[in-house]
Image: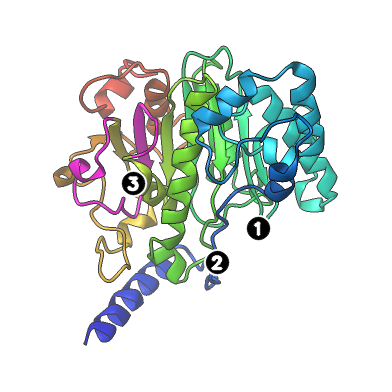
Amino acid sequence: MRRYRRTLVAAALATTMVGGTAGWASGSSQRAVTGPPVGSAAWRADDSLGRALPDPATATPGQVAQFFATLTPGQSERLVRRHPLVVGNLDGAPVPLRYEANSRAVRAEHDPRYERLAEPGRQILAFDPRGRGQVAEVYGDLATARHVSVVVPGSDIDAATFDRTNDPYGTPAGMAGSLRAATGGRTAVIAWAGYTTPVGFGLDVASGDLAEAGAGRLARFTQGLTAAGVGEPALFCHSYGAVVCGLAASEVNATDIVVLGAPGMRAGHVADLHTDARVWAAKDPSDWISKVPHVEFAGLGHGQDPTAPSFGARRVPADRAEGHTGYFAPGTDSLRAFAAIAQGRVTQGHITQDQVTRGEVR
C-alpha cells in the first residue's frame, strides 16, 4: 500500500509539473557532486611549505582563512599555480586568490562549454568541472560592497547553461546582473550554481536528494564568505533552489532568505526552518508553479507553499512578473522589492504592492 501511495504522489507531481512547464523533457537521474575539490589528494600530499596544508575534506572555512593569513604573497601564489582547482573552491580562502585560481582552472579545461567563463574580467569564485560543471561568479566588488546577495537557481542550471542568452532572467547570471543593476550598482551579487540541479522533470525534481546535497554546499559557501571577511548575504532562491535554501536555512550565514516561484521549502512553517534570517516569498499569478501540489510524502514533494499565509513568510509583491522566470525582469514590482531587500532597506513587515506603486520601494 505504501508503495502504491508513493507512486500516486509521484504520478500526480509528474503530471502537474509536465503540464505546467510547457513540455519539459522527461528528466534524467542526476548524481550529486559532493566532497572536496578535484586535486585534493595532491594538495594534501604537498609538503612544499614545510607543513601540512588544511585538508579540504575536514578543515572549516575559518581554519582555511587562518591558514592563508599566515602565508606570504609568494607562498599563496605558489599554491594557486600548483593547485588551482583546490584554491579556487576552498571556502574561506581569500577572494582574489580564488579569482586567480579559477581563471587558471577554467582556461586549463579547454572545454567549449566554459569558453565564455574564460573571458578576461570575469570574477569566478568557484568552478568545479565534475559532472555537468558548477560555477559561482561575482558581480561587483565583494571587498567594498556594504551589501551582498547570492542567487541560488533551480533546475536545468550548470556551468554550460549558467549564462545562456535565450532566457536571460531565468539564469543565475541574468538574475544576478539584473539585481545588481536594480540597486544602482551599490551591491555585490553572486550567481551561485554550486550544486547539481535536476534536469527536466523526473523524480529528482520531486525529491529532496539533490537539494540536500546542495544545501550542505550552500551552507559552507556562505560560511566561507564570512571567514573571508565578506558580509552576510541575502539569499534569493528560485524554484528548486528554494528547496535547497529551505534545507540549508539553519546552517547558512544570511540576513534574508527570499524564495520565488518555490515548490516548497521542505517545511510547514517558517519556524521549522530554524533560522534567524528574515524569510520572504514571492509568486506571480501566471507562474505554473502554482499547479504543483504542495505535499510531502515518502520523500516526494516539498511541502507547504511559502506564499501561503499559514507559512508565515513575509510577502513580496509579484503581480507584474510574468511566468516562472520573470521575477528579475526590469520594471517588475518583484525586482524593485528584491533590490530593497538586497540593500537592507526593508527591515520590518511585508512589502505591499502599494509601496511599490508609490515608489516607497525602489
Asked which quadrant contains residue 237, the reply is top left
| 187 sits left or right of 235 in the view | right
Q: Secondary structure at mark 2?
A: loop
- Report the amino acid beneath label 3: Gly
Mark 1: few, some, or many residues within 10 Å (few <14, many ≥20)? some
Residue on which disc 3 sits: 246
Quadrant in the picture for the C terminus = top left
From this viewpoint, is residue 330 visible? no
Which of 213/121 is in front? Answer: 213
Q: In this rendering, is residue 303 above or below 241?
A: below
Q: Please, what is the three-letter code of the amino acid marked with disc 1?
A: Arg
Magenta highlight: main SS: loop
Q: Position of residue 219 (x, y in %)?
A: 44, 40
Which is more N-terminal, label 1 or label 2? 2
Can residue 124 be seen?
Answer: yes
Q: Are marks 2 and 1 in contact (CB under 8 Å)?
A: yes
Magenta region:
251-276
Horizontal side of 225 relative to 164 (left or right) equals left
Residue underneath mark 2:
30
Identify residue type, mark 2.
Answer: Gln
Looking at marks 3 and 2 on the same chain, the residue that comes earlier in the sequence is marked by 2
Residue 254 belongs to magenta span: yes
Please give the residue where the numbered disc 1 appears in the rendered image.
132
Crowding near the residue tagged with mark 3, few <14, some 14–19, many ≥20 C-alpha atoms within 10 Å? many
Is 201 in front, or is 43? Answer: 43
Residue 209 shown in magenta: no
Asked which secondary structure carries label 3, the reply is: helix
Crowd rating for badge 2 (residues with CA inside 10 Å; few <14, some 14–19, many 20+): some
Q: Residue at x 70, y 50 (%)?
A: 41
The numbered mark at residue 277 is: none
Q: CA distance from mark 1 to mark 3?
A: 24 Å
